[in-house]
Amino acid sequence: MSDLTGAASQLSRRDGGGAAAPPPRERGGSRKPAASQVAAWAFLAPVTIYLLVFYAYPLYRSLDLSLRNYTVRSFVHGHAPFSGLKNYSIDLHDPTFTPALLHTLIFTFASIVFQFAIGLALAVFFVQHFKLSATLRALFLVPWLLPLIVSASTWSWMLNSDSGVVNSVLHHAGIASVNWLTAPKWALVSVIIANIWIGIPFNLVLMYSGLQAISPDIYEAAALDGANGWQRFWRVTFPLLRPVTAVTLLLGLVYTLKVFDIIWIMTRGGPAGASTTFATWSYQLSFGNLLPAFGPGAAAANMLIVMTLIFGFVYFRIQRKQRES
Amino acid sequence: MNPRKSLLKTGIGLLLTALMLFPIYWMINVSFTRDQDIRKSPPNWIPIPGTLEGYRAVLHQQGPYIATSIVVGLGTVVLTLLLAAPAGYSLARLRPRGGGVLSFVLLIAQMIPGIIMAMGFYAIFLNFKVINTLPGLIVADSTLAVPFGVLIFTAFMSGIPDELLQASRIDGAGYLRTFRSIVLPVSRNSIVTVSLFAFLWAWSDFIFANTLDSGGKHLPITLGIYHYIGNNDQQWSAIMATAVIASIPATILLVIAQRYVAAGVTAGAVKD
Amino acid sequence: MNLLSSCGASAGVKIKRTGYDTTALLSQTLLSAQQGNSPDVLIVDNPVVSTLADAGVLASNDQDNIDTSAVAPNLLAAGVLNGKTYGIPIGANTLALYYNKTILSAAGVDPSTIKSWADLTAALAKVKAAGKGGITLSAIGTEEGSFQFLPWFWGSGANLTKLDSTQGTAALQLWTTWFKDGYVPNAAIQDTQTTSWAEFATGKYAFAENGTWQLSNADKAGFPYGIIPIPSMAGGVAPAPTGGEFVTIPLQKDTSRYATTEKIVSCLTSSDNAFNTDTTLGYIGATAAIQAKQASNPELPVWITAVGAAKGRTSDNLGTNYPKISQQLWTAVQNALTGAKSASAAMSAAQAAAATATGGK
């Protein structure tokens, strides 16, 4: 994480950005006087307590739920026997496990790739400051401010097999109706499309601000060297955007892995589990049926967190390798 | 850029925006559609004949919900700023030992699925008797924004030139004074950015509202919409009308604040 | 709502009412009970009562002097667990087939001749040939989907303890064939009963499988409609599942509250009050007395008979096994209708999973 804040602070230098920037500042306070350490942690105290109460505690409860054999009775009255990793084993052996894993991976990577690419392309487009560009850019953010329940319902309605506008348009173009939400092979695609739509504004905002911080002098210098638009972008702009790209992709990863509302409202993870991801599966186990299975549900949610951690680590390694090269 | 090219780009921009906002258009379309035309196949692209029935229902019933959402949103903004700004300042400039660990923990905190948080909060809130209250909901919603806020503030405040801070230190100001009189005013962009994110995420929250405030006297708009959808009588025009109305305050905020957002996300110029 | 305040007033208290979505109510109840925050009165959907009782959340009727002697046994069965009864039904509803008179007469179908599956399928074919939609139903992957499938499942003679019997598979095959032949709208896979009703109300479909609670909506539909009971495979009326809520009393730490709670519950379920509630909600009364009063309404006798033949989902001593079986049942329906599995493969998989989940019962 210190890499990222260091990287982002690199970006702040208006004197040309990444390539010639000084390396990230040293971390470690061994040479700082004690008083300033006290002050530093005093400023951090509220957040630290906040973290312990509001994040550590729910996490602890989730861990506890997953390590015990909870029936509805013991959930209410307590004294659930410790069952070790049995709930995790139940999940691993459940036939839903592999499809859920697959769907989670596909959902996450497809969403991120498209959200980022489209967000970046739009940012590049809008940074050119043509007439109305500021207003249009602001309008692009509207999908992001809609409550998810609204976006999901709207997309469900548009993708309805019989009365949806998407199929109506396809008809006009001579293509047969697609059962977007009721056919197993299209359900995952449909929720991915909706998720991409919702995620574009976030990527647009971040990448746009990254682009804005690059001084126009760089472009002039590159143009003087005879680079055309495309080359300018890949050789000059994109490398300079690396820090912002890093933050955007990482946050995108963390947020997308736990996406739940959109999928649940549009397809409930169905039909027949065709769009079930770990997030929806965990919810389904604990709350989505008449007989709650809190243990396996919490285990699935914890496995999701672990998955996120693993991806986070992999991501950091790639980042570090890239910066060292 | 030459005027013709500019106009062409504006044209393309309009097209792209129209494409992106099509679902919103559809939402508005449905909000004016009569119930008997909702399932027409092919559907009406323009809601004629239309009805204002949906909006009538909304204004009658959903007003208090919107007011509640605004209160919760503003509360979340205040709480998030109070927690995240000092933390960002500390991580960026005061070099606490173990600061990197804390940043990392904040990242992990964002990985926890919402439902786990909600269940944990239920127990805590019940014990502190803040279940079904707005302050409780504000605290819950702030967990959506605080880690991200710390990230933004840290990134931004790292870019404040040393000279500014040194000057104030030489004048004998303590860390708190420096924070209040120098750092905060200069961080205007990032404050606006974080406030915007915090407000929008709180506005859009459903899971915390549903688990922690369902029985409360004041319900936010997301629950209002959800009750419509869950009802036996599915009035789609009312649902979409609620959605449209629910989007208006946030849209206004966004258009006003977007200028600051773009500049504030990464460390911007202090010379702003 | 007014009933709540008047019952509260007569018991000397003010009642605070909190409504939840049905699917969220169970988890919310469990969460509340865990934290010692249970409500005094809890009105829940009947299949959930045995789960709550098993969780030790509810007080049994002997604990709190609720008199259920007048309640029809088939309706009370959902609240019975291990010989003890929990709560009292406020009324019941069930499923039947609504039909669009205009469409049927135009297609030359006489609804009174529909007595078996074969009759119904033939009628659907005629309607489709006349250019109209066949039947709307709900096959969603939730309890509602199971609820809608049960009349066909039970109507084949199958039993919930063995999902993959020939009869059970035949029931699923019936729906699958209808689906393939285009008699059922594709959206049925994710439709709730509310949505499938809305499709019927467009006037484009001949039949709708839906419940008593739609009666008031049916009057507003804008076309003449009728009702026939759901036919069974061989002929006759299929047993349909009972819907409807139970009024239950959660256990409280402070037992002095029970006295007031009992007064409120008796008030809510008294003959006159229950009659009014049932009329408003479109339910059939739970006792013979209320049913007799309702018989004077010409629209209701069909439903009263249907309710009389209805079965509780958790009866047959299924209790808390029902939810596990039900989940496999709706999964099987989804698998078959989407073509992911054949009807027999879907049912076999469902039975295997159900057997594991219920511990081989």
Image (spheres, coloured by chain):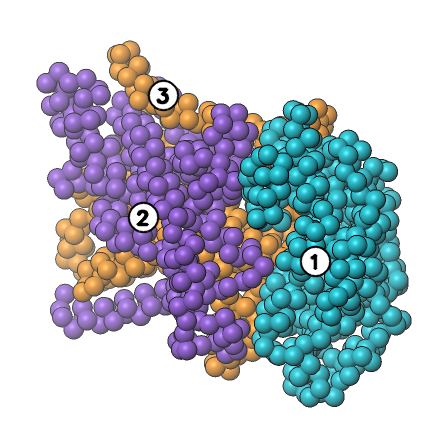
Mark 3 touches mark 1? (CB < 8 Å)? no
Q: Which label is found at residue C283? A: 1
Is residue C95 found left or right of A102 in the rendered image?
right
Instruction: Tell me the quadrant of the picture where the C terminus of chain A can be found.
Output: top left
Is residue C246 found left or right of C280 in the rendered image?
right
**Structural distance between the alpha carbons of marks 2 and 1:** 55 Å
Callout 3: SS: helix
Is residue C192 found left or right of C97 in the rendered image?
left
Which residue shows up at 46% across the image and 72% down it?
B34
Q: Which chain is purple?
A: B
Q: Quadrant of residue A5?
A: top left
Residue pointed to by mark 2:
A206
Q: Amino acid at mark 2?
A: Leu
Residue pointed to by mark 3:
A45
Q: Amino acid at mark 3?
A: Ala
**Among the two numbered marks 2 and 3 on one chain, the one whose residue lies closer to the N terminus:** 3
Which residue shows up at 50% across the image and 64% down it?
B235
Chain hosting mark 3? A
**Structural distance between the alpha carbons of marks 2 and 3:** 29 Å
Callout 1: SS: loop
Looking at the rendered structure, whether the residues under marks 2 and 3 are on a common chain is answered as yes
Instruction: Tell me the quadrant of the picture where the N terminus of chain A can be found.
Output: top left
Looking at the rendered structure, whether the residues under marks 3 and 1 are on a common chain is answered as no
For label 1, count other residues whose C-alpha is less than 10 Å away and answer few (under 14), some (14-19) or many (20+). Answer: many
Residue C304 horizontal/vertical position (percent) = 78, 62
Q: Which chain is cyan?
A: C
Callout 2: SS: helix
Q: Quadrant of residue B194?
A: top left
Q: Which chain is orange?
A: A
**Structural distance between the alpha carbons of marks 3 and 1:** 58 Å
Nearer to me, B127 or A205: B127
Residue A119 horizontal/vertical position (percent) = 35, 56
